[in-house]
Amino acid sequence: MSSADLRYPRPTILADYARAGAGVLLCGAPLLLLEVNHWLALVLGAGFALFALFLVRTALRHRTRYLLTPDTLCADGPAGTLVEWNRLDRLKLSYFSTKRDRSDGWMQLSIGSMGGRLVKVDSSLDGFHDIVERAAHAAEGAGVTLSDATRANLRAMGIVVAGQEESV
């Protein structure tokens, strides 16, 4: 396996910037331009803070690139860290549904190696499947116990890890 330089797609990042900017504007403008009652100001202030945090998160994702190598996954950016596959000790693959029938949604991978910070990437990242596959095989080699939900999500992606078959 060779190295891969992975990033979130530009259209995804731009859409997140637009959503965050609209939220900051729609919640912040009334606070600056209108005289609003105390309770409405509290709600708008909370909305402003949430959208501002989303804007910061989007900027971090925009500035971070992920280097996938046979030995590591390096998050190279403002909040960068390194996951060494041979020292992997945490793996969680979560599915977040956007519809009641679970027909649409996204996945998020959380991984970490001993002594390192957790790296979280979601399924909109180019090369997400490659990272999940590499992490699953590293977890298999390291004997990391996977939750039932993680095993089910790996199966849904077509990734089979020996010793992690569905429990009966």
Image (cartoon, rainbow, N blue to C red):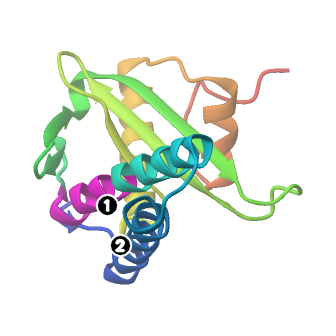
- Residue displayed at 81% across by 56% down: 102
Q: Residue furthest bottom?
A: 11
Q: Quadrant location of the C terminus?
A: top right
* Magenta highlight on residue 62: yes
Range of the magenta residues? 54-66
Quarter that holds the N terminus = bottom left
Q: Is residue 21 above or below residue 36?
A: below
Q: Mark 2 points at which residue?
A: 17
Task: Evaluate if marks 2 and 1 touch, with contact meaning CB atoms under 8 Å apart.
Answer: yes
Q: Mark 1 points at which residue?
A: 58
Judged left or right of residue 53, residue 92 is right
Secondary structure under badge 2? helix
Task: Specify whether residue 3 is in view.
Answer: no
Q: Residue at image x 50%, y 32%? A: 92
Looking at the picture, how far across and down is residue 160, in whole percent? 59, 43
Q: In this image, 50 relative to 147: left or right?
A: left
- Locate residue 35, reporting x and y percent: 49, 59
Q: Is 134 within the magenta?
A: no
Residue 158 as seen in the image, left or right of residue 114: right
Residue 153 drawn above or below residue 99: above
The residue furthest front is 35
Residue 163 location, x and y as percent?
59, 24
- The local crowd at label 1, few if under 14, some if 14 to 19, many if 20 or more residues have their Cα within 10 Å, is some
The answer to whether 94 is drawn above or below residue 32 in the figure is above
Q: Which amino acid does label 1 sit on?
A: Thr
- Whether residue 52 can be seen here: yes
Categorize mark 2 by other alpha carbons within 10 Å: few (<14), some (14-19), many (20+). some
Measure how far apart labels 2 and 1 are at the Cα level.
7 Å
Residue placed most toward the observer, 157 or 75: 75
Residue 1 or residue 12, whichever sits in front: 12
